[in-house]
Amino acid sequence: MNRTFYTELNLDKNGVFGRETYENYIERYREAVQKREQLVRGLFMQNALLFLILNGQNWTLPIIGVQISEIPAIQEILLFSASMAFYIMCATFVTSHCYGGIIDQFGNHIVDSNLIDPDFFNASRKYYDFFLKLYRPKLNIWGEDFYQHKRGFSVFSGLMNIITIAVVLLLPITHLALMGSASWQVYSSDLNAYAKWFLLFATAIINFGGIALVFGMNKDFTFKTIKPQSDG
């Protein structure tokens, strides 16, 4: 998508993708990030609640004064709702990433005639985790670095990248582990057979779909360049 949009920018001779469009993309990106963060918090809460229920914890809900164990099919409800929250969160993550990629291409296009690192320009228009750039073996992936790092930094940056990847993977791994545990309890329960298998099948499809969305975004698929046809 980034390559396609960069090609569109180069084809834009009438200034359709001007600064106003650029600002609108930035606003849409902020909305997508805000929605993503809300969904992440919601998923954390549902996973935490499901974990407590799976481990026999019980308490009374404030205001309404009802114990969690007294809510019918609370485990099945959380299994389905947490799965849906996970899928929507993955979809929103991909959407925010797409908007961020478009903003990056805009920034790259703006500074294309300069020798400066476009990361520093793009970071002024959208939120950027600078620690990722700080611990990158090559600071400026667009050109030559000003400084040559030594072996000590190479080892340290590699270690920090491994830790960061592990921390990021903990959320989906923990979620899938909870989904597996809850699914097993549903499978072992006395729930109606048709309802049981429908819930388990739907849960598997929803969670697999969320993983596929994110995996597909990072998969290096092969595309064939299509040559534009002449007007005749």
Image (cartoon, rainbow, N blue to C red):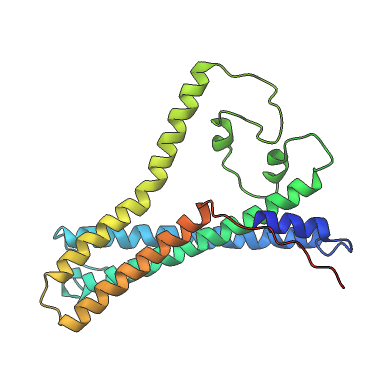
- Side (left or right) of 69 relative to 3: left
Is residue 18 at all visible to an observer of this figure? no
User: From the viewer's perspective, is 113 left or right of 81?
Assistant: right
Which image quarter is the N terminus in? bottom right
Rendering coords of residue 215 (x, y %)? 46, 55
Residue 214 sits above or below residue 66 on the image: above
What residue appears at the point 68 percent right and 25 percent down from the top-left corner? 145
Position of 110 relative to 120 (above/below)? below
Q: Position of residue 126 (x, y in %)?
A: 65, 50
Q: Quadrant of residue 18?
A: bottom right
Give the residue displayed 21% in from the left and 81% down from the top.
Answer: 195
| Residue farthest toward the front in the current orientation of the protein | 232
Q: Position of residue 198 (x, y in %)?
A: 26, 79
Side of 160 relative to 50 (left or right):
right
Return the residue nearer the eye: 179 or 128: 179
Q: Position of residue 7 (x, y in %)?
A: 75, 56
Q: How many marks?
A: 0
When asked about the image quadrant of residue 204, the answer is bottom left
Q: Nearer the viewer, residue 10 or 135?
A: 10
Q: Quadrant of the C terminus?
A: bottom right
Can residue 138 be seen in this snapshot?
Answer: yes
Seen at 80% across and 67% down, the residue is 229
Residue drawn where x is 32% and y is 63% of the image:
46
